[in-house]
Amino acid sequence: MAEDPFDERLKRLEERIAAAKATREGPPAKGHGEYTQGSLAWRMVTELVAGMALGLGIGYAIDWAAGTMPIFLVVFALLGFAAGVKTMMRTAAEVREGRGEAALHRTAATAARNDKRDPSDPDEE
């Protein structure tokens, strides 16, 4: 008995779907679940601005309470700037050393190499 044409068409459709899926599967898109250089740069800018804003707010509040308008505003603005720069430098050190959130910024090749490594084999260190 001849094979049902519906089964034959179904097999061809499944083969076409499998071929289409194989061509669509490529390397994972960059930027998903990783820190990119742009996001790290924005983080540093945000840290600097937050330090400045906090210093300005504290300085303005002290000046308003004490009645000495520009003195503490300037002092705490400079202290806030220094704190922001210090925080930026700490973030840059984390990126350089691969610690903290910066450790998420790994390349796909490094991740693949680590996945292939056999933990029970002492020669692969």
Image (cartoon, grey):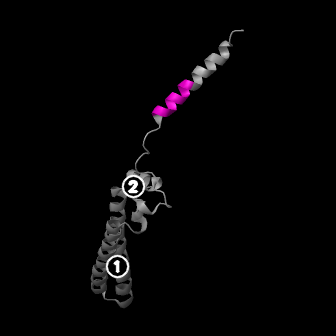
105 above or below 12?
A: below
**Quadrant in which the C terminus appears:** bottom left
Give percent across and percent down for residue 100: 42, 68
Q: Residue at x 61, y 17 (%)?
A: 9
Q: Residue beneath label 1, please?
A: 55
Magenta extent = 15-23
Instruction: Classify residue 93 by image quadrant.
Output: bottom left
Give percent across and percent down for residue 124: 41, 59
**Quadrant in which the N terminus appears:** top right
Instruction: Classify residue 111 by image quadrant.
Output: bottom left
Q: Residues within 10 Å of mark 1 (few under 14, many from 20)?
A: many
Q: Residue at x 39, y 64 (%)?
A: 102
Distance of label 1 from label 2 (alpha carbons): 41 Å
Left or right: where 9 falls relative to 54 = right
Type of amino acid at the residue the image marks with label 2: Thr
Q: Residue beneath label 2, please?
A: 110
53 above or below 112?
A: below
Q: Earlier in the sequence, mark 1 or mark 2?
A: 1
